[in-house]
Amino acid sequence: AVGMVAFAPDLAKQQLRLLVTTQDPQTGHLPDKVDRCGRGGGCSGKPPLLSWSVWEIYQQTRDTAFLREMRPVVEAFHAFWYSHRDNLGVGLCSWTEGMESGMDDAVRFMPQYAAGRTNTSSHVTTLDFWSVDLNAYLYREKKVLASMADALGDPHGSAFWTAEAKALLLRLQSTFFESGRLPHTGFFQDRYFNGSVVPVQGCEGYAALFAELATTSQALAAAAALGDPGRFLGNFSLRTVSKQNKNYNERGYWTGPTWLDQSWFAYTGLRTYSARQGAESLGDLAQQIKRRVFNVGVGFRAPDTTPLNEHYDAETGEPLGATHFSWTAAHTLMWLLDNHDAQQTLMF
C-alpha cells in the first residue's frame, strides 16, 4: 500500500481495507495474510506496521475520512500486542515465533537462543525474550496514534498517546541497547526475561533507528556497526545478521542475505538521525546503502528486466528466493520516489 500510494492512492487504501476486514473483533488481531476470497490466514500474524502504512497514505492524500476509518482499527491492533504478547505484564512484548516477526528463520529464533514460555496466570505464551523490533514498532505506533488524534482534532487523544510514547522511550533505550567493549560502540539487541542479552546482532536492531527510539550516541554506535564491512555492510546492501555471527550464511534465508525492507528501514532511520547535530555523517551512510543497491543489484538498473526477488546475496546482489516479490517491489518504488536523483533515473 505504501509503495503504490504515490500513483494509485485509491488502490492503496483498498489494500488496507481488505486486510482489516479480517480483524478479530474480540482481540484486535490481524492475520498474516488475506486470500483471494477475503479469508484471513497464514501464520500467527505479522508486525504492527499498520499505523505506519495508514499514516503514510494519509500524508500523501490528506484523506481525513480514511484516517478516521482506520484509527479504531489501529488502536485495537495496538492493544492486541499488550493483551496477548506481553508475557510478564510489564509493558514489553515478545514474538510467539519467528514467522510472526516476518523474519522466519532468523538466527535469534534458532533453538539454542529461543524457547517458548507460558505465563500460567495470564495464559500468554511467547518466546522467552523481548524483541527490539516489536517494541520499537509499538513505540513508533504510539507516536503515530498521537499524530492521528491531532490530525482529527482530538487533543486529549494526542496528549494520551504522546505521554504513552514518552513513558516507554527511556525503557526501550536502556533495555535494548547493548554497549560494546569500547567507548561509543554498541548495538540494539533482544533481551531475555532474566535480563541477559540475546547474543545475536541482526537486522531487528535496524528498527530502533526506523522508530527513532535511539539517543544520538546510540544511533552513532549502531551506524558504525551498519557501516562495517566485517559486520553488516555488504557490497550490495546490509546483511540480516552480523557476519561475525557463527551462524551467518550468505546463501541462507534470514541468516545472512539482504532483505530490501530491512535495508530500507535502516536507510530511513539513518536519514532521520542525520538531521541531528553531531550525526550528519549518517546521511552519507544512508545514501551509500541506497547507491549500492542500484549499482550492484541484479534487476535494479535499466535495461535489466530481471524480476525483483525475495532476498539477495549481500555481496553480489544476486537474486535469491521467490521471484516477483512484493516487499522488494514496494520498497524499491519507495526508494525511487524518494528525492529523485541520478541513480534512480538510471533504473527506468
Image (cartoon, rainbow, N blue to C red):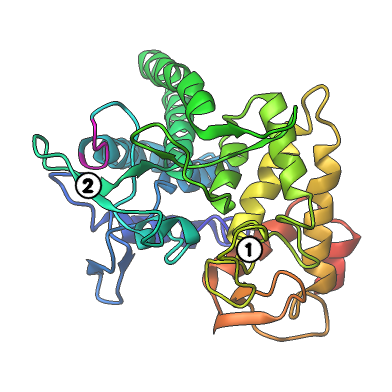
Whole-Å distance between the Cαs marked 2 and 1? 32 Å
Looking at the picture, which amino acid does disc 1 mark? Leu
- Could you say which is closer to the camera, residue 286 or residue 76? 286
**Residue identifier under label 1:** 260
Kindly indicate the quadrant of the structure image that contains residue 155.
Answer: top left
State the residue at coordinates (36%, 13%). 156
**Residue identifier under label 2:** 117
Residue 100, magenta (yes or no): no
Mark nearest the camera among 2 and 1 is 2
Looking at the picture, which amino acid does disc 2 mark? Arg
Q: Left of 263 or right of it: where is 103?
A: left
Q: Position of residue 64 (x, y in %)?
A: 44, 36
Residue 86, magenta (yes or no): yes
Kindly indicate the quadrant of the structure image that contains residue 222.
Answer: top right
Magenta residues, start to end = 84-88
**Residue 14 shows in this picture:** no
**Earlier along the polypeptide chain: callout 2 or callout 1?**
2
- Could you say which is closer to the camera, residue 334 or residue 288? 288
